[in-house]
Amino acid sequence: GNSVTQMEGPVTLSEEAFLTINCTYTATGYPSLFWYVQYPGEGLQLLLKATKADDKGSNKGFEATYRKETTSFHLEKGSVQVSDSAVYFCALFYNQGGKLIFGQGTELSVKP
Amino acid sequence: GAVVSQHPSRVICKSGTSVKIECRSLDFQATTMFWYRQFPKQSLMLMATSNEGSKATYEQGVEKDKFLINHASLTLSTLTVTSAHPEDSSFYICSVADRPNSNQPQHFGDGTRLSIL
């Protein structure tokens, strides 16, 4: 079946460090891929998305490239800030069934 | 501004109480809304898909009689946790599809923290 696997957290970084959160997926066909961010006590916000292979989603300094050959959608940011501390969810949307499937989430903590 | 409004943000109540959570689409009419449940430090689990004017579609393992969903208008869906017990304590989040009659991407409410004593 369709699934999403993220690297386990928590990830703790110093401010201005480089961030990578790995995400791989299993799906038949061509799903759309998303990264959502959840700040403490809040719902989810769409961070970025990519709808087809080789697409790069970007927003607020974050980037992720849809790699079909490696079935991956790793999230990266060149220089993290304390305000980036949150839980990040990778998700796929597969047209058949029409549901968002989430990874388990990766908690990021950025220290000043 | 917010696309989805979820109310209340936090509920604390006694065991056996029924609790209603509202999810409103503020910017557009939503024929489809989604209800998720999130356990501490875990991912979101889709509970059901709420369809305006018809019965909700529940995921496997979700009790229909326990989690009542009503989607009476194009801007409002409600989730009622009936006769809540401590094991129902969780974070409940609703979402609305970005475009009418589409399931992606989804805009999420801020969630409701339900605590049953």
Image: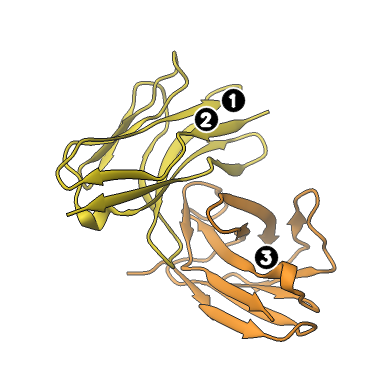
Chain colours: A yellow, B orange
Disc 2 crowd rating (10 Å Cα; few below 14, some 14-19, many 20+) is many
Image-based side of A105 in relation to B74, left or right:
left
Per the rendering, the mark at residue A27 is: 1
* Image marks 1 and 3: residues in contact by CB distance under 8 Å: no
Disc 1 crowd rating (10 Å Cα; few below 14, some 14-19, many 20+) is some
The quarter of the image holding the N terminus of chain A is: top right
* Image marks 1 and 2: residues in contact by CB distance under 8 Å: yes
Task: Give the structural element (helix, strand or loop) at label 2.
Answer: loop
- Most extreme residue toward the right is B65
Image-based side of A95 in relation to A87, left or right:
right
Report the Cα–Cα distance between label 2 and label 3.
Answer: 26 Å
Residue shown at the point (75%, 82%) measured from the top left: B18
Task: Give the structural element (helix, strand or loop) at label 3.
Answer: loop
Task: Give the structural element (helix, strand or loop) at label 1.
Answer: loop
Residue shown at the point (56%, 51%) measured from the top left: B42
Q: How many marks?
A: 3
Which residue, given by chain and number where applicable, does mark 2 sit on? A31
Which residue, given by chain and number where applicable, does mark 3 sit on? B52
Image-based side of B10 in relation to B49, left or right:
left
* Front one among B83 and A108: A108
Amino acid at the residue labelled 2: Pro
From the image, state whether disc 2 or disc 3 is nearer to you: 2
